[in-house]
Every structure is written in structure tokens, then in C-alpha cells.
Amino acid sequence: MKQFFQSKFFYVVTVIALLFCIVPTVLASMGVTFVLRDAVNGVLTPFQKFFNYAADAMDGFSGYFYRFDELVEENNQLREQVAELQTQIYDSTEREEMFAWMADFLEMKRVHTDYKMLAASVTGRESGNYSKALTIDVGSSAGVEINMPVVTSEGIVGRITEVGHNWSKVTTIVEPNSSVGAYVERTNDLGVCRGDFSLAADGLIRLNYLPGDSAAAVGDRILSSGYGSVYPRGLVIGYIDSVEVNAYTRSMTVQVRCAADYSDLSRVMVLTDYDITVVSASDLD
Amino acid sequence: MKKRDKILMKSETVISEKEIDLHRPETRSLRQRIKAIIDADIAGRFVVCVLLLVFFALLQTTVFARFRPFGAIPDLMLPLCLAVGMTERGRWGAIFGIAAAFVIESLGAATVSVLAVLYMLAGYLAGCLTVEMFRDTPATRAAYTLVACGLHMLTTLFVLYVTVEGIHFGDAMLKSVLPEFVASVVFAPIPHVVAWLALKGFHKPREEKVQ
């Protein structure tokens, strides 16, 4: 066994492996895209799209097994419909989804006239189990830059943290180290939403620094405050899922359910430009 | 018997000195030497390995990332490195391991890259142990997979402690490390079988290949 580790070959590949660990890590921490990584992503992103279509198809197929009762009922209802209509429904489903998605964003655009948005598809998710990052199919060639917010019609998804030629990495707001300036829409109390590792799997984040006398309650909508200069003011972050008040310290522990469903994201929008409006507590009052 | 003598004995006709020189390593041109090293067989293996690498990397970062069996994304690349190492031996395993780690960390959104060393060691040792100590059987493959996935657990734990502020050990184990281990072990037979099927053609005896 000892001789395995004493060959010249082993020393060489160990050095190469260490370089492949250190160089991408250092470059990623500096916010610089590793050229080779850019190349790999550039080549494989189109294939990722194809695999995602396959995953979509499999998702629909696997539903026949785990939603059997529901589907039997649905099937009985469908039997009553005319065959011609069924065909039309199948053909138009995808088109309807696309229209609904675009209508949501048009509504968003109508409300926030200052937003310039860029449509993107989610092509990949994290490869390990320690982050909730996504890969999207637009990059520097489309004008995407680091720290641009990524949203859906439901709310904030995250921000761009790495940009390649035709791909970008999105760090979601449920990531443990991410934070968003926020306020409770009903009470106007300011706070900061932070990702929490123990809550991330359930799509929850914490809302910290709320005033002790805040009247925030379950179901209240949480919006971005504009603090931090990454997310514009007024984007939906989520809804309060639970509120606990410590009887001794009077501090509040608030959990927020993110509005965007990370497990089922397929299309997002990148906000490439918007007016930054920082809001203060006095403005809200 | 020397090569030159063999050649002389093989043919009844007179062989020129120039023709004999072609079989001497020192008189071969660079092109001839490269040709001798990179034959069609090796090129075929290389292409198959690249296709395996791309296919499983895409499978892991798209399909399995969507369905998350057992609550985690199974690591398909690690058993694939073991399979390539065991079938193609240590050197191929080591190089394949580094390439696999780089591709999967590029396609995924890895901020901390640590897999290159793990995959390289897995591929290299699996190949060396298969040659020197244990035969390639389903049992040895299962054992190597369990050990490698165990090491991967430690790697994931290390990355979590480095990247996530104030993480609890219990949280890390229950929400990330253990589900990943279970999912990786359960789905490990897929890359093992696919790699074996894809590469076994290159290990047939010469007579079988000719037929």
C-alpha cells in the first residue's frame, strides 16, 4: 500500500488536485470567474437545459405514482370531456403557463416602471448539499453583472454572485450568509431577513432586529426595504410563518416563509436596472 | 529473444536495415512514438470516459438536484471515479477524479472547491488496490463506495463548518450530511454499472475483439 503513495505520478496528480481545489476557491472568494470554469459552463449549459426538460417530463410521469388517488379522480372527470378538447388542452398548457408567467411580470413592470428585467431559465441547481444556489442561462453577454437581484413574480429569489459568458450563479436569500433589508408591510417595522441553515430546507428565513413592541403577526407580508443597495424597495420577500416573543428579553423571533418556491423554479427575471430608494423608519411613518 | 531477431526470423524475405530500425525505440520519430502510445483503444476509452463524466455531471446537477431523493442530491461522480479507477486502473482513476471534481464544481454552484483531492484519491486508490490487493467484485465495489461516501461525509461536514456561520453539528448531520450519504450509497450502483458496461468492451481478450 505504501508504494501507491511514493510514485512520481501520485505526487504530480496530488499537486494538480490541490491546485484545482485552491485556485477556484480563491478566485470565487474574490468574485473572479475561473476561465476553465467559464468554459465548462459555457459548453455544458445548453445540455443542462436539455436535461432539465427531461427532468420536467420525469416529474410529470412520476406524479402518476405518488398522486394516484388524485389522478384517478381527475381521470374520471377527464373521461367526460370530448377527446378533441383534451388534445387542445394538452397543446395549449405550455403556452398558457408561459402567458401566465409573462402576465405576472408585465404586472410587476407596470407597478415598478423603473425596473429593467431580463428573462432567464434555471439550468442547474447546486451540486452539493451545502448551498441553495442556482445556475441561470444568461451571463455577461446579456449584460448581467454581480449583485443584480433575481426575482420571480412571487418575490425575491436572490442575487447574482458569479457571472460567466452565457451563465450566472444565483445565491438565494435562504443561503445562511445572505441578508436582505426588510420591513413588515402592515406595521412598517424595519428588520433584516437572514438565511438560516436549519430553516433553509423548508424555504424559511429569519427576520431579525424587529422592535420589541412590534405588532408583526403570522401572515403579514414582508417586503424589501432597499437597505444594502442590492434589492430595490418593495419586492416581496415572503410571509410571516411564526412569531415567538421571549417573555424575559422581549425580543422577537420571527420566521418568514419565502414567497418564491425554490424547489420548483424554472424561470426567473434578472433586474438589470432600477432606481435605488433607501427607506428609513421615519419615511415609513 | 530480441525484437530484431524475431523480425528476422518471422520473414523469409530479406528485410532492409531501414525496416528493422523502425522497431527500435531510439530511431522512431516523435509522430511514430505518439502513435504507439495513443492507439485507437486508448482514444476510445478517453471518449467513453468524457461522455460518462458529462452525462453523470448533468444528471446530478439537473435531474437529481430536482428530485432530491432522501432529501439530498446523491453524489454520482464519486462512485463513477471508483468505477473508472477499478476498470481502467489507478492513473486513469486519478486523472478522471480531478476532471470530475472540476466539472461538477463548475456546473454546481460550488464556492469552496474540495472535491478534486477526494475524487483523485478515490479513483487512484481504487485502481491501485484492484491491481495489487483485491479483485474487482461487486463486494469490493460496495466496500470502496461505502468508504468513499464516508470520506465524502467528512468533506461535506468540513465545507459546512467553513462556509456556514454558527452551524450546529446535529443540523449539519441530519439536514445535509446523512441524507447525502444515504442518497449517494443508494444510487451508487447506477454509475458503477453504466461505467462497467461502457468500458468492458475495451478489456476483452484480443481474440474476442478480432472475432
Image (spheres, rainbow, N blue to C red):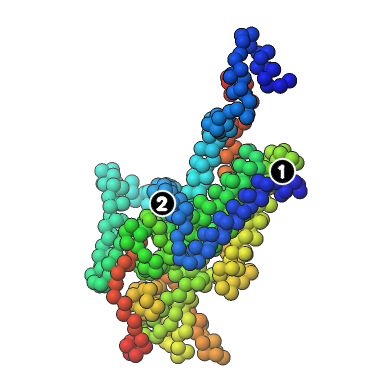
Q: Residues within 10 Å of mark 2 (few under 14, many from 20)?
A: some
Looking at the image, residue A100 sits to the left or right of residue B119; the answer is left
Residue A269 is situated, as x and y percent measured from the top left of the image, at: 33, 63
Q: Is residue B118 above or below residue A280?
A: above
Type of the residue with mark 2: Gly
Residue B160 is situated, as x and y percent measured from the top left of the image, at: 58, 66
Q: Residue at x 62, y 38 (%)?
A: B88
Looking at the image, residue A229 sits to the left or right of residue B93; the answer is left
Quick one: SS at disc 1?
helix
Give the residue at mark 2.
A42
Residue A207 is situated, as x and y percent measured from the top left of the image, at: 46, 79
Rounded to the nearest whole Å, what is the CA distance between mark 1 and mark 2? 37 Å
Q: Residues within 10 Å of mark 1 (few under 14, many from 20)?
A: many
Towards the viewer: A225 or A77: A225
Q: Residue at x 40, y 73 (%)?
A: A238
Residue B90 is situated, as x and y percent measured from the top left of the image, at: 65, 43
Mark carried by residue B190: none
Type of the residue with mark 1: Leu
Q: How many marks?
A: 2
Give the residue at mark 1.
B129
Q: Residue at x 30, y 56 (%)?
A: A97
Q: Chain of mark 2?
A: A
Q: Quadrant of the C terminus of chain A?
A: bottom left
Q: Is residue A251 above or below residue B114?
A: below
